[in-house]
Image (cartoon, helix red, strand yellow):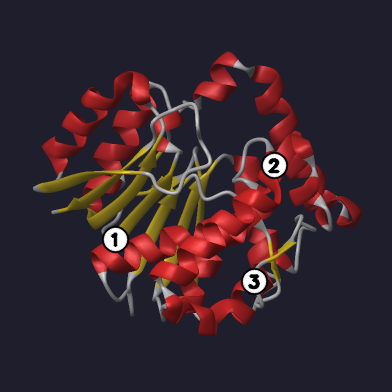
Amino acid sequence: MEKSVKEGWNCALHNKDISISYKSSCLDACENDTSFNNFKSNRNYSQVVGCDSHGKPTCNMFYDWVVSNHPDFIKHFDKFKENDSIGGPPTFTCGEDGEFSPNTMRYAKAAGDIQKYFGDLTDSDIVEIGSGFGGQAKIISCINDIKSYTMIDCVEAIRLAKKCMSKYDLGFGQYYYDIDNIKIKDYHLGISDSAISEMNDDSFDFYLENILSKTKYTYCTMNDVYRKDISISKFKNIFSNVEVIPDRPSINTENECYILICEK
């Protein structure tokens, strides 16, 4: 079954200039190879997706966390660097392990959280709401022999994700759904990195009830502090176990971001 939902991203509703420039940067990267080779350094893109614009301190912060908490990831670092081989992101020297972008290290941090709370993802079907260019999918697949990864985002972002992922030799199924064509099915793991929390109430409810409710486990970073209690309550209506933990380390010093660790 497929369903459609209207644009519910708060940025698109309340800050149209940022939304328009972001989507334009996605389309430009899809249609122009010169733009594609540098889209991750385009401010119109980087101000929306991830933390590449935060520079070396942020990159080193996440690198230090990954090395300290998941030293087993070090053997995957060469594969992680493939995430920085396209799109021209800013990269910084991290210890003796070479250069990484802040985004890649942040995706590695999230992958570490997911491994800690949900264990091995071998042969898993994963869905991500707000998947951007597919960076989280790439990093998780470097660590786990997953079965499939489904990406859901706006039309422009999905077009760019398809182009990015086509550059890799990936051994798992990739499925792409824009907000006008979303397939409803069961998944082992759901992920949302400050995506569902940036939606209006109607879209928040749609994705929770139609996508995340179909997962066994869900990992959500949340920045909707203004409705935190309501959001947590909605997740508890779906999942039998919801653990709320601080988002640490964090790039967001203004909001008290948090993570929801959910299990059916």
Q: Considering depth in this image, is 62 or 173 the residue closer to the camera?
A: 62
Say the numbered circle drawn on residue 97. none
* Residue 44 at x, y percent in the picture: 75, 35
Please tell me whether mark 1 sits on a helix, a strand or a loop: strand
Identify which amino acid the numbered label 1 is placed on. Tyr
Marks counted in the figure total: 3
Instruction: Identify the residue under disc 3.
Output: 95
| Label located before the other in sequence (1 or 2) | 2
Q: Which of marks 2 and 3 is in front?
A: 3
Say whether residue 55 is left or right of residue 66. right
Tell me what residue is drawn at x 33 percent, y 79 percent. Answer: 122
Please tell me whether mark 3 sits on a helix, a strand or a loop: loop
* Residue 24 at x, y percent in the picture: 76, 35
| Dot 2 alpha-carbon crowd within 10 angstroms: few under 14, some 14 to 19, many 20 or more | some
Q: Is the C terminus in the top left, top right, bottom left or bottom right quadrant?
A: bottom left
* Residue 2 at x, y percent in the picture: 38, 46
* Residue 144 at x, y percent in the picture: 41, 78
Q: Distance between the residues labelled 1 and 2?
A: 29 Å
Q: Which of marks 1 and 3 is in front?
A: 3
Q: Distance between the residues labelled 2 and 3?
A: 24 Å
Identify which amino acid the numbered label 2 is placed on. Ser
Q: Measured along the vertical axis of the image, is residue 172 above or below residue 127?
A: below
| Label located before the other in sequence (1 or 3) | 3
Q: Measured along the vertical axis of the image, is residue 200 above or below residue 37?
A: above
Q: Measured along the vertical axis of the image, is residue 207 above or below residue 29?
A: above
Say whether residue 169 is left or right of residue 139. right
Instruction: Identify the residue under disc 1.
Output: 187
Tell me what residue is drawn at x 39 percent, y 35 percent. Answer: 257
Say the numbered circle drawn on residue 46. 2
